[in-house]
Amino acid sequence: MKEEIHGQLQQEIRKRLDLELRNLPNQINQPQQNQQLKTPDNIAGGLPNLEFMLIYKEDPRSLSENAIEVSEADRSMVQPRISSTQAVIIQKVRRGNYWILNEADIDYMVPRHNIKINEYNSKTVANLFECQGYQSEYSGFQLIKPAKVSAISKGETWQLVERGILQFD
């Protein structure tokens, strides 16, 4: 049963990837608001595990069972890096706006499935994700690439390593 589901999921992934790749030339020719559209070829580090992305796109709630709920830590917890920029610290909280998911021993961060992005949290979201096409009256977003984080304190705090990408409708 498990192998059958895995086979069906792999087949669905191949179909969707093929469809996305066929539509890519149309998307590249129409970037939103003079922004370069992110494609698998120009995203640093490529795309993470496709199964993970497909599951998030199709049924993000199903990932909540294995997710750790987090939010950006208070500024008082933010520590300077070696350079003059500040590190973004993420901490485990109840009812956080983001989830930490571990895939192939890499910690990824994604927006919680029911996050509402508004004027109060849009700056925080922009610290964690590149927001393509965001407008205050957006109608939804698609996760293009999850953020990468690195554990500072196992299961409690993380540091943002690489911002993710969200595409707004």
Image (tube, grey):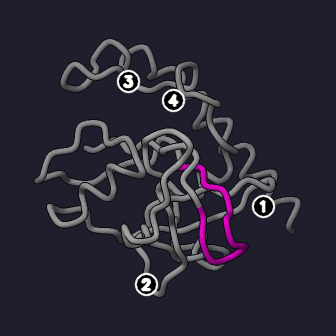
Residue designated by label 2: 95
Residue designated by label 4: 20
Tell me if 145 is positioned left or right of 118 in this view: right
Q: Nearer the viewer, mark 4 or mark 3?
A: 3
User: Vertical placement of 128 versus 96: above or below?
Assistant: above
Residue toward you, 82 or 49: 82
Residue designated by label 3: 37
Tell me if 87 is positioned left or right of 9 in this view: left
Nearer-N-terminus badge (2/4) = 4
Q: Tell me the quarter of the picture where residue 62 sits.
A: bottom right
Nearer-N-terminus badge (1/3) = 1
User: Vertical placement of 162 versus 9: above or below?
Assistant: above
| Residue 96 drawn at (x, y percent) | 43, 77
**Label 3 environment density (alpha carbons within 10 Å; few <14, some 14–19, many ≥20):** some
Marks 2 and 4, Cα distance to the nearest angstrom?
A: 33 Å
Q: Nearer the viewer, mark 1 or mark 4?
A: 4
Q: Tell me the quarter of the picture where residue 68 sits.
A: bottom right
Tell me if 115 is positioned left or right of 148 in this view: left
What residue do we see at 56% from left, 43% from top? 82
Q: Amino acid at mark 2?
A: Arg
Residue designated by label 1: 5
**Label 2 environment density (alpha carbons within 10 Å; few <14, some 14–19, many ≥20):** few
Nearer-N-terminus badge (2/3) = 3
